[in-house]
Image (cartoon, rainbow, N blue to C red):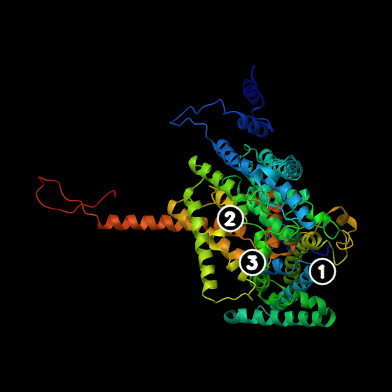
Amino acid sequence: MSLKNNLHNLKEKYKGKKMAPAFNAIHTFLYAPNETTHSGSHVRAVDDLKRTMNTVIMALVPVLIFGIFNAGYQHYAAVDAANGVVRQASLFGNFLTWENFIMGAWTVLPLVIVSYAVGLAVEFLFAVIKGHEVEEGYLVTGMLVPLIVPIDTPLWMLAVAVVFGVVIGKEVFGGTGMNILNPALTIRAFLFFAYPTWMSGDKVWVHQAVDLAGGPDAISGETILGYLAQGKGAEMSYSVADMFFGFIPGSVGETSTILILLGGLFLIYSKIASWRIMLSAVLGALVMGLIFNGVVDAGWITETSKFYGLMSFAFWQHLIVGGLAFGIVYMATDPVTGAQTNKGKWFYGFFIGFISVLIRVFNPAYPEGVFLAILLMNVFAPTIDHYVVRGNINKRLKRAKNATILPRDGEGKAQELKAETV
Amino acid sequence: MALLSKKDTSLILDPLADNNPITIQVLGICSALAITAELKASIVMALSVMFVLGMGNVVISLMRNIIPSKIRIIVQLVVVAALVIMVDQVLKAFAYELSKTLSVFVGLIITNCIIMGRFEAFALANGPWRSFLDGIGNSAGYGLILIIIGFFRELLGSGTLLGFKVLGDPIEKTGLYAIGYENNGFMLLSPMALIVVGLIIWVQRSRNKALIEEN
């Protein structure tokens, strides 16, 4: 008997038991359920929530693999830099090496494992206590979390943050599909506010930089935005190509814009994510970048200003550094927390891009603001939808009021009939 | 004869749990978020409110038959303001550092909804002894929540309790800090205080199902 049949039989056996939700979660993760609806009309399809989530995870896998190599590469590059050797990144020369992979996997995979183990444990616990089926929401969150934290985040901090994010960000609202805030970003925001020293500065983006700090082998790696925020843009040795392909320090999965772009195209092609949100967010970021560039060009701000570095940064380059691309593609498009109406998605996306660059430039402590911008717009998404829906109702009411229906031929007198449907 | 009748006992004990001013009536949230980053400040705030509410209830109760109802709010404000000024002066004289920490929030006891609420709801209709018990009970319920929040915020946010380094020294790396523990800076921010209040409400309602409102 195959594993599939065994699981189906086991499910019958444990029906109604306390642990049934936990078991069913594993069962339906592997196979489509063997029962069908018996009444009413229904569509038979296997692209349920689990399959949707898995599609997003597929789009994240290239980013994760790149992040593993980049973690190793940034470590060895920083060691070289400390010895006075400037590395030139080349994909096959010094990037896709076993050395990088082993060091990266050794640091990144524990983050992935802790994120999934803790998050799913909380999900299973709530499912068993509340007696409902385990919800699939954590599948994507668990993969996003390790990709948006600095490489050396202590594992216990990650575990605390995951518990906080899943309980406060999701379960208190009623679980998957009910949450107001994106759980992965809630986790990121918790880490940012709770342990700021581990989330910013020039030591956290490179593996072992914190451990080696102060010693003779000290290494460091500042993000591009970090350089700019301190007005040290000239000291930076990264080319635009480095930024686009991702050979730069940063959170684990956020650096490679090209892979994120490919992942985004895959999500648009598979109709999982909204292209309206992605496009409008890019537009919003470009508009804000242009405004800042315009302020610099007009001479309203001089090099003495502490905002000069970030404000004078070419507007389109904002898209290829920091977490903006990652946030737009994988976080802003979350179907639960984002705007639901098509018109609303344009506003929602636009303001995410716009506010991200705004916070990035003006945040004195930490030159990045994508996660804050998305969380803020998560809160406003229902309001945006409300006004879009109201606007549509008003438009149609107006049309209904003005509509006239002409009488059919053959009737005696012309009379105006009230429109029943418009 | 018992010191307190059964009815009188419930005046003190009810606000501690099932009729708590903060977690059930959701009053006095503002100060509960603002001054609970340290346990010491929470305790002093709780005692100050206890003094003001206990004395205020007695004074209002004694005057309840001579206060014209049209200007009763003004009279209540005068009473509470006088008591708050007394508290403020005592704090400034004997605990200057602490009064700096509490800053305007001592003055803002005047606007604490719990106080005006108890004057209106209880002291205007009951005798001085019962009003006094009611004031003590409600301020104890308020103070209890304040102290719980202050305990967790100071312990997890600063690693101290009443200023004592109970978890070790974060700079010398002793105690828990030796194995990589870090203080949670989020605990020191007001939003986290609101989340802690929410968690207390969650625990309380899951223990006592009668508190859950019908939707």
Q: Which of the numbered marks, if any, corresponds to residue A363?
A: 3
Q: Which residue is mark 1?
A: B40
Disc 1 crowd, CA 10 A, few/some/many (<14, 14-19, 20+): some
Instruction: Indicate left or right for B177 with B36 as reference.
Output: right
Q: Which residue is mark 2?
A: A320
Give the chain letter at badge 1.
B
- The Cα atoms of the two marked residues, 1 and 2, are separated by 49 Å
Disc 2 crowd, CA 10 A, few/some/many (<14, 14-19, 20+): many
- The Cα atoms of the two marked residues, 3 and 1, are separated by 33 Å
Identify the image quadrant of residue A177: top right
Question: Is A367 situated above or below B73?
Answer: above
Question: Is A196 situated above or below A405?
Answer: below
Q: Nearer the viewer, residue A45 or A383?
A: A45
| Residue A296 seen in this snapshot | yes
* Quadrant occupied by the N terminus of chain B: bottom right
Q: Secondary structure at mark 3?
A: loop
Identify the amino acid type marked 1: Lys
Q: Nearer the viewer, residue B185 or A17?
A: B185
